[in-house]
Image (cartoon, helix red, strand yellow):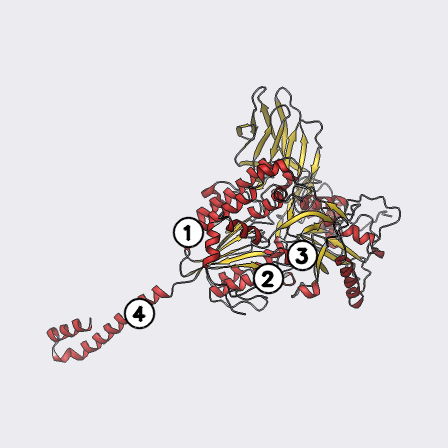
Amino acid sequence: MQILFANLFKVIAPVKNRLWLVCLLALCAAGATLFLSCGHARGTAASPKMIILGVDGLDPDLLTKFMAEGKMPNFARLAEQGSFRRLTTSIPPQSPVAWSNLITGMNAGGHGIFDFIHRDPKTFQLYFSTSKVEGPKHSFSIGSWVIPLGSGSAEQLRHGKAFWEILDEQNIPNYVYRIPANFPPISAKGKTLSGMGTPDLRGTYGTFTFYTDDPTAAVGAVEGGEVVQVEVKNNRVATNLIGPDNSFRKNSPPATEPFTVDVDPLEPVARIAFQDQQFVLKEGEWSGWLPVEFQLMPVIGNVKGICRFYLKQAHPRFQLYVSPINIDPKNPALPISTPTSYSSDLAKQIGEFHTQGIAEDTKALSDGVLDDKEFLEQSHTVLAEHRRAFDAEFPKFHDGLFFFYFSSLDLNAHMMWRLTDPQSPAYDAALAAQYGTALEEFYEQIDQVLGEVMPKVDDNTTLLVLSDHGFAPYRHSFNLNTWLLNNGYITRKEGVTGDPNEPFSDVDWSRTRAYGLGLNGLYLNTRGREREGIVEPGAQADALLEEIRQKLLAVRDPKDNSQVITRIDFASEAYQGPYARSGPDALVGYNRGYRAGWKTILGAFPAEVLEDNTNAWSGDHCMDFTKVPGVLLSNRKIAAETPALTDIAPTILRTFGIAKTNDMKGQSVFQAR
Amino acid sequence: MFGSHKVKIEGQLLERVKTCSDAAGYESIDEFVIHMLEKETKKIIPDESSTSKEEIQKRLRGLGYIE
């Protein structure tokens, strides 16, 4: 180019203009050099990208087994070409705690999430740890109607900055799908959808309804649902869908919407009609999602949801299952996405979907309302929805961070473990023959998703596939509160007449030194903290905790002398941060095979300390955290030999050239230690 | 144990209470005042009625981890 300009200069420039042209030539040459160097720099200094698949409950031992059997070729390739490590989980290893560790880079002392269940020490009011949903604070009455003044609220209880908030501050684009412990979703520049912790429309964590004319059915509330007795009269059932508590009415009775079912007298089919909809279901058939509108107050107040129907049986008994009423993503009654319109946009792309945080209806299986086949059908629907969302959103990813969460391995391991474990008290050989590979099939589907991701992983992309914890058999329950009672740490009032299944029924707090609450929590009844605390904080409390620790570690299962509890972590040692003393005083780490009993979690006192677990919920992870690690795989070489969940947020930030915050406990897994 | 207690409201406060009570559709000033006191005292001493505890447990029991 310089030669061209030089020749032009000779041909056209009179002598008096040569100086001007020399300058022009120099400027053009400099500009050309600059242009070329910019283009070159754009080619090599491309922005970093990151893809994270968050697969709840992906277990390293199962993964290793399935890879070795050739059932997960994409994971095998990633492990071989990149890295595969066990990922140290949280204390305790429960999803809301674990994901909060990942999200903030802190442990519970920093983010304040210690368990699924928290309590107010002054009132012993229990609540779900990551969010609180409240009705309007003020209202007035007109007759039997109560009119709210102002709307209700949903409050996010997790403390600390989420990694995507920091990315937002640095204008790094990001997408976060259904990460747990993000309901209501915190304000974000990117698209986010809330996951675990999102209630159904009734404000619960999943309440199904089961309609039957079977006179032997246990009618009323069951765990996670309601059984409604109906009558088939002239081949018709007339009953009601049960909606949210109607806070517009005094005493807040549930809102209801009538529906009818016309059962064919001969064929196994029925026609269902409600509001302006009618559809036919065969026995064993699921409906799609159907919108339902509950009238809370004439003209002024209504709320919309969606639900699915399953005709379990038309003859000889009528049995109809209706799913929990989910928040309608097209008309969300509570905030479930950022921007607010995103849930609706996504529904328009992929159809309606489960918005309830834990969508798989494990309670329906535990209660025997759905059988294994039916539960698996519902579970596969959940995964299919997630894959449709993935297929809609992943192709749009070109820049920044893409985070996508899958729940299927966790919930199906919880329910299907017994069919892979002959030692489980809930094992059934016939069911195992039919459904013993069900969990493996879900693992294979996740491998297929990874197969869709890997072609998009280029030199500028960091891929992480990780889980919050692994899994273990849950064969036996340990009733901590019963043990504390039997060992003199809890005293109950004389002449106990209360319901032994009610939380802390008839506890004499003036003579009670410790209690258990939640899946792993051990609390001291501390003076100045609990309403009727008697244990002095400091040396007395420390000595008492150590005494209880030694005794619990010495507990043996009389059946086979197995150690029931293999680890107890004191909060003072395990946690750092402003909330370190806000949760349990100690975390009980159960051995593989053991977990806190069903009733002791909410403060009840079953008769036995140890019981067999015959529930379909037969796999778990709320154990000794060292016994249920998660996984971490990457296309890059992981330098850390023992990475932990608290390392993930620093890893994300470092990938985008952002320094971690001072309160983050971990460091990038790609950094040598 | 509970008994009853009388409170005298007069002057400007009474006028304001009347206005609010009418606007909110209460049947009487007494009903309005009682409702407001119920709301405010719940903020200080949360409702520990067995109904509210039962409601909370019912919500939590939907979680598969708990029975």
Image vertical order of residue A319 relative to residue A656, above or below: above
Residue A436 lies in what quarter of the image?
top right
Circle 2 marks a residue in which chain?
A
Residue A37 disc label? 4
Which residue is under mark 1?
A396
**Where B55 falls versus A218 (above or below)?**
below
Residue A309, image x and y in percent?
Answer: 57, 33
Badge 2 crowding class, 10 Å Cα cut-off, few under 14, some 14 to 19, many 20 or more, is some
The answer to which of marks 2 and 4 sits earlier in the sequence is: 4
Q: Residue furthest right?
A: A494
Q: Earlier in the sequence, mark 2 or mark 3?
A: 2
Q: Looking at the rendered structure, which numbered label has been put on residue A160?
A: 2
Mark 2–mark 3 Cα distance, whole angstroms, equals 26 Å
Amino acid type assigned to the residue bearing label 3 in the image = Asp
Closer to the N terminus: mark 1 or mark 2?
2
Q: CA distance from mark 3 to mark 4?
A: 56 Å
Q: Nearer the viewer, mark 2 or mark 4?
A: 4
State which quadrant residue A310 falls in.
top right
Residue A169 in view: yes
Q: Amino acid at mark 1?
A: Lys
Q: Chain of mark 4?
A: A
Cα separation between marks 1 and 2: 29 Å
Discs 1, 3 touching: Cβ within 8 Å: no
Query: What amino acid type should be assigned to the residue bearing mark 2?
Result: Gly
Report, in whole angstroms, how far the alpha carbon at label 1 lies from the one at label 4: 30 Å
